[in-house]
Image (cartoon, helix red, strand yellow):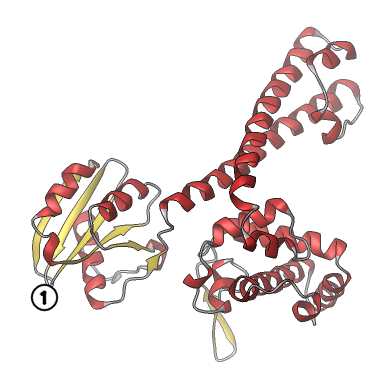
Amino acid sequence: MLFCGIDLHSNNSVVVISDENDKVLYSKRHPNNLEEIRAALGSYQSDLFGVVVESTFNWYWLVDGLQEAGYSVHLANTTAIKQYDGLKHRGDESDARHLAHILRLGLLPEGHIMPKPMRAVRDLARKRMQLVQQRTTQILSIETCFDQQTGVHISSNNIKKLSATDIDNIGLGAMESLCIKANLAVMQAVQTQVDGIEKALAKYCRSNPAFLLLKSVAGIGDVLATVILLETGSIERFADVGNYASYCRCVGSVHESNGKKKGEGNTKNGNRYLAWAYVEAANFAIRYCEAAKRFYQRKKAKRNAVIAIKAVAHKLARACFHMLKTGEVFSVERCFT
């Protein structure tokens, strides 16, 4: 039985194949060319137990290509892999060799490989979030210009309704007007793209029964239900509710011993988009759901507002897990009692 580790970089990959005794049979650096890497693995394919690829920013093409070629591919969770600190020398070849080694031992911390079609829709939702942030940047810039030039504050909703003609009629100087028009043009162009993406996401998500389930949760509307649905993927990949809450960054990462704090774990471990979605949902829930508001106030009185809102987010994440598992609609009483 053979084991393969691939240390993936932006423009090249180091491929190492080792046997059951960790003896290296193949080690070579290749350019990031799928056909070349598949050709290098081809003569070993029948004996390969699996191929480990680092979960770097550019893993899609390699993982998809190897899966299509019939390889058993594992995505390594790089934040959870720690080599021996006393190593005198480390390099790309030793990193790839270590990936193959821990795969052989059955100790590989794996990342989730979402199916390609679903991953594309999820990435489209992430693109929407990116564009919304860019739109907000333009709106804030226009607000600042009006405050500077006129002393009058204009709300973001009114800014969205402005046209170039409206800017001309305000009576600002030519340079000041051009400055605002530039932001306005970018904002409107981004808004057009956001609208198009939202229509595509609506077609994909809103016919999904899980989407309607999520919308029954206090604080979760169309946008948050879309994010939670796509970022969660198959709920079956989580062993229990604690694993899901941890993935959503809704649990603490403190290391304790004998009742004393000894440090913290990796607070960035997990999905930042789900973390954002559940905190947003918690903020809406305490505004419009009386039970959530009372729970929040009790937690806030004991600790502080930040801990309290995270506690509400934790409750909502746990509720969503059980709903997606069982198909039951949201129950305020069961969530916040």
108 displayed left or right of 19: right
Tell whether 222 sits left or right of 82.
Answer: right
Quadrant in the picture for the C terminus: bottom right
Mark yes or no: residue 170 visible: yes
Task: Give the tally of numbered discs.
Answer: 1
Whether residue 31 is visible to the viewer of this picture, yes or no, is no
**Which of 140 and 106 lies nearest the eye of the viewer?**
106
From the top left corner, tell me how far across and down residue 314 is, in percent: 67, 72
Mark 1 neighbour density, 10 Å: few (under 14) some (14–19) many (20 or more):
few
Res 156 quadrant in image: top right
**Image quadrant occupied by the N terminus:** bottom left
Q: Position of residue 226 (x, y in %)?
A: 64, 53
Q: Quadrant of residue 177?
A: top right
Q: Disc 1 designates what residue?
A: 21
Q: Give the structural element (helix, strand or loop) at label 1.
A: loop
Nearer to the camera, 117 or 42: 117
Measured from the top left, where is residue 76 in percent x and y? 34, 63
Taking the view exactly as shown, the residue that stands out farthest to the bottom is 258
* Vertical side of 38 occupied by 175: above or below: above
